[in-house]
Amino acid sequence: MITFENVTKKYADGNTAVDSLSFDIHKGEFFVLIGPSGCGKTTTLKMINRLIPLTDGTIFIDGKKISEYNIHELRWNIGYVLQQIALFPHMTIEENIAIVPELKKWDDATIKDRVTELLDMVGLDPDTYRNRKPSELSGGEQQRVGVVRALAADPDIILMDEPFSALDPISREKLQDDIIALQQNIKKTIVFVTHDMQEALKLADRICLMKDGKKVQLGTPTELMEKPANEFVREFVGNTNKPAVPINLADIMQPLTETDPVPTVTLSNSSLSHEILEQLSAHEVVGITEDEQLIGIVNRQMVIRYFSEHLQERGAING
């Protein structure tokens, strides 16, 4: 589907951002580029749709050099999702999604049906959301719109540049789950850039770990965890293959203070469950029930604070 042959990117100041990269990305594959800051992963991604011109080597899509494609047709047929989302603030959600289909001269009825289909696909009610402006949506909802806008004209390839890194932990985990479910349905070729190894291991069919513009190891998540090519890979993957310590609900649950009805989750064990996180991705507060009695509440801010404090503790230990 996408082939890199000795691809290099050098800048005028002498910096080599990408150095002789060669690999294949298969059709329908979720392919993740990862590595430390400055390793060349975003440059590699942007060379696929010619946002950054390559210096040497060749990139092929379906056996044809990208330089031989019309630049506009190339980009129309490659969806692109950014960290910054970049929705047009003065346009409605429907208008944002419809940009590329309109450029491709789709008729109005087809565009409207496509917007409805895509909003349904990511759990945003079309009647509620199509006429809203981006400022009326949460960060997670805006990023969902960014994803479906990239899918609007049904491209074969989707490029995603750290699309979830600016979101809070709950929204990020929910969107990761959503993109896994979405990919099972749409089966696009997705090239995804991240600096988060946990995210890469969760999402990828294969991972390309880069350092100093070079490919260090390319393989499945299992291969990187169980057969690291060298010490750099071993350290970068770290302890991500070890199960996380569950969050004890007692550490974050608060007494009943809410007078308004809240969505509830039945207590199944003493840990923060995926079902609670699912509810918190849509609601600020969730009630916890046991034996059909409301025993406490968990709110979004408390969970985020817990994650933040424990990430700081881990950083202090690692430092």
Image (tube, helix red, strand yellow):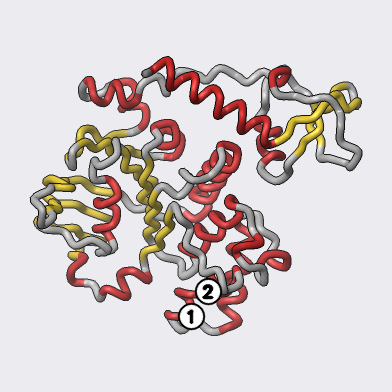
Q: Is residue 80 left or right of residue 186?
A: left
Looking at the image, do the residues carrying marks 2 and 1 touch, with CB atoms under 8 Å apart?
yes
Classify 10 Å Cα crowding around label 1: few (below 14), some (14-19), many (20 and above). some
User: Looking at the rendering, in which quadrant would you find the N terminus?
Assistant: bottom left
For the residue pair 227 and 17, the one nearer the viewer reads as: 17
Query: Which residue position holds label 1?
Result: 102
Residue at 29 percent across and 37 percent down: it is 35
Q: Residue at x 12, y 48 (%)?
A: 15
Query: From the viewer's perspective, is 168 left or right of 58?
Result: right
Residue type at numbered disc 2: Ala
Mark 1: secondary structure: helix
Q: Is residue 14 above or below residue 290?
A: below
Quadrant location, the C terminus: top left
Residue found 34% across the figure and 38% down from its top = 206
Front position in the image: 115 or 254: 254
Q: Residue at x 13, y 51 (%)?
A: 8
Tell me where residue 116 appears, x and y as whole percent: 63, 68
Circle 2 residues within 10 Å: few <14, some 14–19, many ≥20: many
- Indicate the amino acid at tag 1: Glu
Q: Position of residue 184 (x, y in %)?
A: 51, 48
How far separated are the C-alphas under marks 2 and 1? 6 Å
- Of residues 56 and 11, the one nearer the viewer is 11
- Residue 117 left/right relative to 23: right
Q: Is residue 93 left or right of residue 300?
A: left
Q: Which mark is residue 28?
A: none
Q: Residue under circle 2?
A: 98
**Position above or below: 278 against 94:** above
Q: Which of the 4 image quarters holds residue 257? A: top right
Q: What x and y, as percent, mark residue 47?
A: 24, 58
The spot of residue 197 in percent (x, y) is: 39, 32
Q: Secondary structure at mark 2?
A: loop
Q: Is residue 126 above or below residue 208?
A: below
